[in-house]
Image: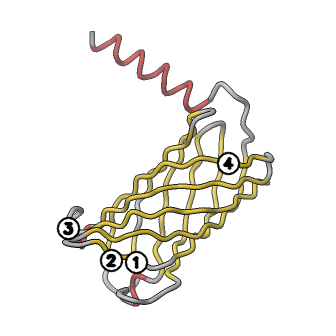
Amino acid sequence: MLRRMAVRFLVVGAILAFGVTPALAGPGVGLSLGEGMMIQDDVELSPLNAEAMVYWSFANVSADLGFLFTLEKFGVKEAELVTIRPGVRVAIPGICYLRGALPMNVLDDFNYGFLVGVGKTFLNLQALKLFAEVDATFMENAKFVDQFPIEARVGLEIGF
């Protein structure tokens, strides 16, 4: 039973990783804007932010390094104005992509967490892509559950 489940997991993983549709392998850059809501005891608007990302894609898997910049300062400490977000995206061909990342605030007091998200490419001209994404971030300084922002992002990717 366990062996059959392991084989199925490997087959599904290979299909997702290497895909049933051809994908370009190589580097790229992306830029997106995001805003959302901070959920704690009550709900409040989170600051507008921009994410610059460099990535390397192979088939349907993309390793990326994002730099998140807070564009508005209300309720944000100076140390949280820049967050590094290394992560991975896995495309499910024809449906969407899933994103996972490890956000880290490295200035002042070190803070880390994890990000989960789902996105969709709406315009795919191979070298140029327009996408939308919804993310939730859970940080250690908030004990991963006390507060977390859910944000919507819209962006543009350029592959080389």
For the residue labelled by badge 3, is the local secondary structure a helix, a strand or a loop? Answer: loop
Numbered tag placed on residue 122 in the rendering? 4
Residue denoted by label 2: 110
Numbered tag placed on residue 146 in the rendering? 3
Instruction: Give the amino acid at mark 2.
Output: Phe
In depth, the one of 78 and 76 nearer the eye is 76
Q: Quadrant where the C terminus lies?
A: bottom right
Tell which tag, 3 or 1, sits nearer the viewer: 3
Mark 3 or mark 2: which comes first in sequence? Answer: 2
Q: Position of residue 77 (x, y in %)?
A: 36, 88
Q: Position of residue 62 (x, y in %)?
A: 59, 47
Residue drawn 78% across and 54% down? 128
Q: Quadrant of residue 92?
A: top right
Marks 2 and 4 close (CB-CB < 8 Å): no
Instruction: Give the amino acid at mark 4.
Output: Phe
Marks 1 and 4 close (CB-CB < 8 Å): no
